Image: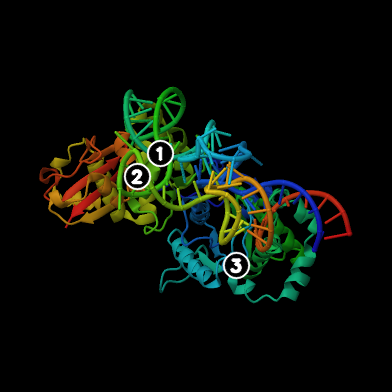
Amino acid sequence: MERARDSTVTEIIDELQWRGLLAQTTDLDGLRKALADGPITLYCGFDPTAGSLHVGHLTQVLTLARFQRAGHRPIALVGGGTGLIGDPKPGGERSLNSPETIAHWVDVLGRQLSAFLRFTPEGSAPQPTDAVLENNGAWLDSIGAIELLRDVGKHFSVNQMLARETVKSRLGGEGMSYTEFSYVLLQSYDFVELYRRHRCTLQIGGTDQWGNITAGTDLIRRMDGNEPHGPVHGLTTNLLTKADGTKFGKTESGTVWLDPELTSPYAFYQFWFNADDRDVVRYLKVFGFRTRAEIEELERLTAERPAARTAQRTLAEDLTTLVHGEDECRKVIEASKALFGQGDLTGLDAATLDAALAEVPRTEADGPAAALPPVVDLLAASGLVPSKSAARRAVQDGGAYVNNVKVTDIDARVADGDLLHGRYLVLRRGKRSVGGVVVT
RNA sequence: GGCAGGUUGCCCGAGUGGCCAAAGGGAGCGGACUGUAAAUCCGCCGGCUCAGCCUUCGUAGGUUCGAACCCUACACCUGCCA
């Protein structure tokens, strides 16, 4: 794909603005100046709350990447320490995960994050903009209680902490443990450590991180006095919204993960492909490296020929390639083409069909056709519907298809002639959920 | 620690002994329309060997012919008091 010409060190702010990413900064003029004065080091933290990053994380990950392309040095920080405590969220207290689990997740997130940034290649001389991967467990795991309370805690005012939005909402509702209440101390201290270790002078995050970020810049000033490595800044990116008001990054089957084991590349591709017309241009800005000219062209195409879905296709291809690689992307495009083709599945050759069905939920069964379970059972077994009752309903609703032919009989069974190439069945629920049966 | 209130299906929320698999709304799913979009209208929305049966209303017991609804204990949440 045609890559954007990298922004220069100072243009990065304008670029973020154009992409609709810039929400708040601690001192915009000061930040512009710092960026202009030479490469800076910036960081963004990712707490291990699950065994994979999800599409929502991409906003921050790619923002780090943009800074790197613009000539700055990014640090991806994984929260091996903070993950043990938990950033308070408005919804309610988090449940703690075991240290072993967290350690494992830290590993996974670190690997995932590394794929998006440029590190010093093996055997090469380090460059000033090479990315750094850190884990705050390195300092938080060993900090003593006395040290934390005396050296860090003394700089925090409980009055201010109580005034924070999340804290207020929690106190007015579910309440909050002391553990979570203390979280901000740890994240703030991370910034201090990175400032000292790497001269990191900028922390970025989503708008929900504003409080934690400013607490960090404040703490650096209080602990390190005159900011020996230069003034520190904070920058937040806008929370991504969807035109229909629902949460970004979820589908019927839940969160869209980057891990191919949790969200198949096919499902990942389909997620982006199904983006709403009203959202797709904003997504291209936030999630891709397409140039302004390219995106404006795609915007025009969306307005003129929405049915062609050119912008969605571009978005889906760019992101699938970025996250899963070119080969995988090619496969899922082929699979999508085959399964959403003109409806004539008999025209597909066995290899294409086999590859396509490998991308969707499917089940295996013992032949011959006459011995196969009823269609309703196959629908449930393939995972296209969650239960046999749901499968029955799907048929009753007229939303179940075998090889693109609507199933009308609730007791329908498969006949020999139905098997494509003697061993495949393409199951479909509704318009876009496709599954398969492979007869062994 | 004391007192009061609360805990219902994915979420919100009604339901105070049989007519409750449980009102209503939202989300979700399907159909029509279209473009694998949105909006709109219609239908569905615990499970199963599906005109029937089974399991659900914080947990465990109890009362009763019969309990989401009554009683007891426990857990958690919220508020007021200390």
Residue A94, numbered circle:
none
Give the Cα distance between marks 3 and 2: 41 Å
Tell me which colouring the rendered structure shows.
rainbow
Q: Nearer the viewer, mark 3 or mark 2?
A: 2
Give the Cα distance between marks 1 and 2: 47 Å
Label 2 packing within 10 angstroms: few (<14), some (14-19), many (20+): few
Residue lying at 26% horizontally and 54% vertically, measured from the top left: A363
Residue lying at 64% horizontally and 65% vertically, measured from the top left: A190
| B22 horizontally vs A177: left or right | left
Q: Nearer the viewer, mark 1 or mark 3?
A: 3
Give percent across and percent down for residue A358: 25, 54
Residue lying at 44% horizontally and 62% vertically, measured from the top left: A112
Q: Quadrant of residue B12?
A: top right
Query: Which residue carries the number 3 mark?
Result: A84
Residue A389, numbered circle:
2
Secondary structure beneath disc 3? helix
Label 1 packing within 10 angstroms: few (<14), some (14-19), many (20+): some
Q: Earlier in the sequence, mark 3 or mark 2?
A: 3
The C terminus of chain A - image quarter = bottom left
Nearer the observer, A78 or A199: A78
Give the Cα distance between marks 1 and 3: 43 Å
Q: Chain of mark 2?
A: A
Task: From this view, report whether residue A37 is shown above or below residue A121.
Answer: above
Secondary structure beneath disc 2? helix
| A253 horizontally vs A200: left or right | left
Q: Chain of mark 3?
A: A
Query: Which residue carries the number 1 mark?
Result: A294
Asked whether the viewer can see residue A230, the reply is no
Are discs 3 and 2 less than 8 Å apart at CB?
A: no
